[in-house]
Structures are given as C-alpha cells and as structure tokens.
Amino acid sequence: MDVNELITLIKEGENERIEFKAKATKDIAKEICALANANGGYILVGVNNEGKIVGCNPKTVLEVISSSIQAITPPVKIETNTVVIGDKKVLVVEVPKSKTLCSIGGVAYIRIGSGIRPLSIQEILMLSSELGVLTWDEFPAVELEEIEDEYVKWFFSAMEKARGRKIDRKDWLIYLRSAKAIKGNKLTNAGVLFFTDAQEFISHSRCRIVKIVNDEPVWSREFIGPVWKIIDEVFAELMSQFKTLEVILGAKRVKLPEYPPRAVREALINAFAHRNYAIPSDIRVFIYSDKLVIRNPGGLMPGVDLSDPEHVPRNPNLCQLFYDSGYIEKYGYGIRMIREECKRHGLVSVEFKVSPNRFEVVFKKRAEELLDDVDKKILELLMTPKRSGEIAEVIGLSKPAVLERLKKLESLGLIRKVGRGAHVKYITKA
C-alpha cells in the first residue's frame, strides 16, 4: 500500500471495514477477529479516532499483534505494511474475510459499523451455516413424538415411486436415522421440516406469494406445512395465476405458459433446499406483470460459482430427503436446468441475483419476441392515452382484433388501462 491509498482509506473514516487505532493493545485481536468474521478490512495503527496521523513504532506494534493473535481460533492470516508520511509511520493491518468462524476464548466477535460485539447464538448459527462450518439441518430439534405418521408414509411412498426403493415399514425409523432426520430421540431440523407442520417449530419456514401491480402489493397468500407440501401448493397456485400466451412459430400458432413450469418448480425446490434457515425470514414469491421473482434467505455457499455451479449443499440432510422423494432430480443440475428450460421456452430470460444474505431467481418476459410490427405501432400510438376505437381507425384493423392485441400487450405488462366502462383508454407503462 502506498501513501495515496492510505490517505484514501483515512478519508473514508471508520466504518465496517476500516478501524483507526492510535496505538496497539492486546485487544487488537478482537478487532482482527471481528473483521475476519465480517467482510475483512483494514486496521490503521498510528491514526487516532479523528483520523489524524499520530504515527507509531511498527516494530512494537507487530510484537503486540503477533502475541495477541495467537488467541484467535482458527488462525487469521493477516498482512502488514508500513507506510511513511513525513516523519510518521502508520502500520496497515489487512485482515481477510475468514472462510470459517473465528473466536477468542470461545467467543466469536463481529464488526457492526465501526464497532464490535460478541455474536449471539442465533448469529453464530446463521454465520456458521453461511460459511458451511456446520449444517443447521442435522441439529436435534423436537421430540420424536411430534412426527406426523401421514407425512412419513407419504415420504416412503414417494421414494418408492421416484427411486424404486421399497423400505419395509419396520425399517422406516432406521432409515430416517441413517438419513439424519432423527438423532437420538429427537427429530433434527431436517426431520422437522419434512415430517411435521414445521411452522409450529420453525415459524419462518413458510412461503408467501405476493402479487404486485404498479409497484404496490394487491394481494398475498401464505403457505404452511412440511416443506415438500408447501412446494406443491405454491407451484399449483402459480400455475393457476400464469396466463397462456399465443405465439406464432413458423406457420403454426402455439400456446405457451407465461413461464416455463419445470424451471419455476426447480427454482422453488432450490429455494427450500438451499436457503439459510438460521435467518428468521420466509421465502417470498413476487408476481409482477413482466417478471416472476423467487427470493430466499441466504447467499451462495463458499466455492459455488454461478457460471459453473457445483453441488455444495448448505442443508445436506434436507437435500437428501428431497432427493429420496424425487424433488431433486440429480445433484448439481438445478441452475443448469433452469437456464436450459428458459432457453427452450424462448420467451423468458432468467437472472440469478446474489447478496450475502439473499438469493433471487428472476424470470423476466422477453416481450420483444412476441411483438410484430402492428404491436409496435400500437405501442407508439399509446404514448398518449387512446381508446380502442381510435387505435383501430389508425391501424386499419377491426375493433375486436385491436382488443385482442391490447389484451396481449397488457398481459405482457407493456400497457395499462385508465378510466372505466365506455371511457376506458390505454397507455404505455412508464
């Protein structure tokens, strides 16, 4: 790091990635631990809280750091650099983001803003799950007596149909123990999600569909139960909401669903199989006029690359139950299959949006593929509001033919109605 880079950091001020320290004490290990558990960052020793360069003795600081960071488990590989400004020296400590959860004396720290604090048990579970340090789904959660026999019966019936494996009834519990749905005399979190009405124990394991019109929610519906049942019910509801589009392919007029069903179902399954259940938030599905968004809590696992995705499950035991019952077709194929199905459909593109605590699958209509020259002319006319009769007169089509085209353009989210009854006009959406 050179002088200019140092000055740039100082100008930013203390924040979630930058810490000023006039001098080093053994508590610097907590700062390093907290940064490593967050997103990494810099500690500038020789800069006071006001951002003034006061200088330090790099050799002495390095001795303090070398001694104090021995307490961090697992070790953090920091890099240090001395920057000289005038007659003063600043030691820059660069802390990388850790791939595992770091702690000091059994206490894990996190950097929030410009401060640090110990992590709560819930936060440790969340962060550890995000880092892949432990699997949340294998923890014993509720008493075995809470298991629902009808859901167990459904599971083994589904496994026989999907995988051709028939397990004798007397061996059902043995199998569920081997699959880590049961541990000791308790259901694990994976077992709770699959074999109980899970929201009694994990309230945020539900799903909600929200319909959005003109950027405002107009209705929503909540789905509860075991996760496989929620997936089936949410998918059925979406299928009932999707319109059918008529498209001319060559000399044929064919009907296509608004969105590719197989891709949508796969995205739903992935949302439940790979979400971070330690984050107290439910799965949301948003229906817009021009897109469908499936959002789940939890980012990608470390090492997963969307351009070449591999199967790195956050919830391996839950995934195994999904696989056994036929919901997961084969490991590591979900994202590829979604892309392939959208390409085959031809009228929908797909985008995967990733942030540290959220993953979104966005299916977006490719309206341009459905528009001919007449449709485009109508859109040009509707830069200002017009009645269907006015459009018919300009275009030279019958009013019923124009109304059919207006219905299509409206279903694609390109135009909207204004007014009522005989006074209805149409205008392009801003």
Image (spheres, rainbow, N blue to C red):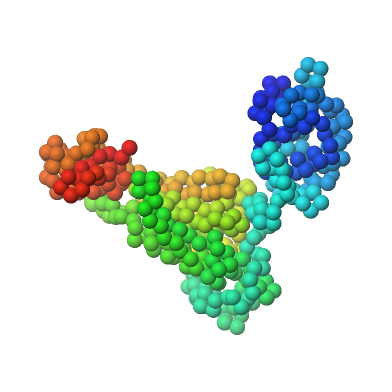
Residue 227's spot in the image, x, y percent? 51, 65
**Could you tell whether 312 is left or right of 286 in the image?**
right
Q: Quadrant of residue 141?
A: bottom right
Residue that lies at the very extreme toward the top in this rendered image: 86
The relative height of residue 240 versus residue 42 in the rendered view (above or below) is below
**Could you tell whether 250 is left or right of 396 in the image?**
right
Q: Residue at x 74, y 24 (%)?
A: 52
Residue that lies at the very extreme toward the front in this rendered image: 50
Depth check: give the residue in front, 410 or 78: 410
Report if residue 296 is visible in the image.
yes
Q: Quadrant of residue 24?
A: top right
Residue that lies at the very extreme toward the bottom in this rendered image: 170
Residue 386's spot in the image, x, y percent? 19, 39
The relative height of residue 362 versus residue 195 in the rendered view (above or below) is above
Q: Quadrant of residue 200?
A: bottom right
Depth check: give the residue in front, 261 or 149: 149
Depth check: give the residue in front, 381 or 219: 219
The relative height of residue 92 versus residue 73 in the rendered view (above or below) is above
Q: Residue at x 25, y 39 (%)?
A: 427
Quadrant that contains the N terminus: top right
Quadrant that contains the C terminus: top left
Q: Residue at x 27, y 46 (%)?
A: 410
Report if residue 365 is visible in the image.
no
Q: Give the total of numbered labels.
A: 0
Residue 330's spot in the image, x, y percent? 53, 60
Q: Residue at x 35, y 48 (%)?
A: 213
Residue 391's spot in the image, x, y percent? 16, 39
**Could you tell whether 41 is left or right of 209 in the image?**
right
